[in-house]
Structures are given as C-alpha cells and as structure tokens.
Amino acid sequence: MKIEAVNENTCIVYFGDRITDDNAGLVKQAAEAIRQDMADVVTDLVPSYTSVLVCYDAVKMDRFGIATRLRQTLTRSERESQMDDASTTIELPVYYDPEVGLDLDDVCKYAGLGRDDVVRIHSEQTYRVYAIGFSPGFAYLGITDQRIALPRKATPRQKVPTGSVGIAGSQTAIYPSSTPGGWQIIGRTPKKMIDWDSESLALVAVGDRVQFRSIDRQEYIDLGGNFDEL
C-alpha cells in the first residue's frame, strides 16, 4: 500500500501496479472501510483498477493527518476482514443470440468455435469488477478467456443498445445505457445496471463479482428484455 498526495485536499491510495483479482478485492475492501470509518473528513471516493482516490476536507485535516488516518483505517480493516467477505457476487441473465448479440458470429469466427462454445466459455467463469467509468454504471470486468478475447472494433458504433454485453480484449462489460462504443457485442441482459433512485446508483461496485447466466429468448422477454436500440 502506498499513499501519495495529489493536491491540497486529494490523495491516492495504491495497492499495486497490476490489474489483478486480488488488487480489485483490496480496492473494494479499502473503499468500504474508508466510507465507514472516515466519513467525518472524507468528501468523496473514486475506486479504480488498483487504487482509490480520496478527497477530504482540508479544513479538518492536512495531507499528513489524512495519510495517518488512512493507514490506521486500512491496517485495521486488513486485520479484521478477509478479502472475499468484502465482495458480492451478482448473477446477470444474458440472452446470447445474434438477434441482440450483434457481434456474436464475429467472435465465433475469431475463436474458431460454435455459438454454444463461445456462450459457455463466456458464462462459465466469475468476473471481478475492476473499475467503473466511461458512463454511469459501466463496469469493466475481467479477465476474459483468451480464446474469445476479440479486440475492440476498428470503427465504434454510434449507439450500442442498453444492456448489451460486450468483449474488448481481456475485459467484458455491460452497457448500462445506450451510448457509442466499440466493444464486441455478444448478448444482452434485461437487468437494469443503473437505478437512479437508489443510494448506490449502480448495480455493481468495484471489487464485486459478476456471474453471467445464459437464458433463452422467452425468459429474456419475461424478465423485461426488449429488442429496440434504446
């Protein structure tokens, strides 16, 4: 763990320099501990792949004091918690079909595999949420099996439908809203990734785990899925 000042009221806590499952778990655990124990001085937190950006009230604490408080909080949290206890596994139903999986056949061609094999490979593992960004609730998940790790599209789409599940290299993700994007779309979930009325806003947080479950067309419809471009 390394703490570095950014400016007079912001610092970054680093947990490593590599994107790994373990580091994502540490980021998740740290963010929860800081929110719980340091709400009196911390004004905002931004978890990322290997770090947590901490904004604090400079009137109440200087950069030396915040570094001391952070070390105390995170050391205590590390002693009291096991990393896996700080993670949540969220199951997401996905309809894998060219009807909504706009690039599913391209992924099959890239991998030299049939649709059933690509779906099985993508859905059989559990993914860690490494970061959230690009748009509200857009979660970067890893690590995608190298057999289906197709690079981004050379020319991004102007609009990717809400709920689309995509692959870009070693990561996979779900589009929480309709936005431009260059990920290879292999399916769509009827699950809403953003709840504007909830306190957490996003369905998943950095450090959580995601498990995809393959569903058929009828279940997709029954769960509220649609086939429009919005």
Image (cartoon, grey):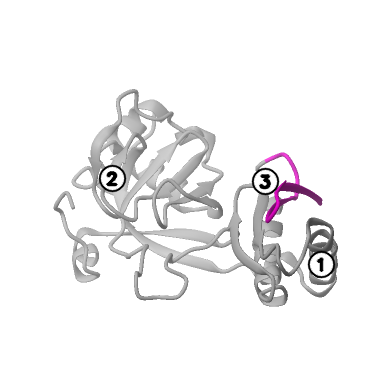
Q: Is residue 5 visible?
A: yes
| CA–CA distance in space, label 2 to label 3 | 28 Å
- Toward which corner of the image does residue 74 lie, by quadrant? bottom right
Any magenta on residue 2? Answer: yes
Kind of residue sitting beneath label 2: Thr
Badge nearest the viewer, 1 or 3: 1
Q: Residue at x 52, y 42 (%)?
A: 144
Give the mark nearest the N terminus, 2 or 3: 3
Circle 3 sits in a helix, a strand or a loop, which is it?
A: loop
Q: Which mark is residue 69?
A: 1
Along the viewing direction, whichever of 157 and 188 lies nearer the viewer:
157
The magenta segment is: 1-18
Badge nearest the viewer, 2 or 3: 2
Badge nearest the viewer, 1 or 2: 1
Kind of residue sitting beneath label 1: Arg
The residue where tag 3 is placed is 20
Answer left or right for 94 relative to 140.
left
The residue where tag 2 is placed is 179
Give the mark nearest the N terminus, 1 or 3: 3
Residue 173 pos. (x, y %): 43, 48
Does the magenta stretch mainly form a helix, a strand or a loop?
A: strand
Circle 1 sits in a helix, a strand or a loop, which is it?
A: helix
| CA–CA distance in space, label 1 to label 2 | 40 Å
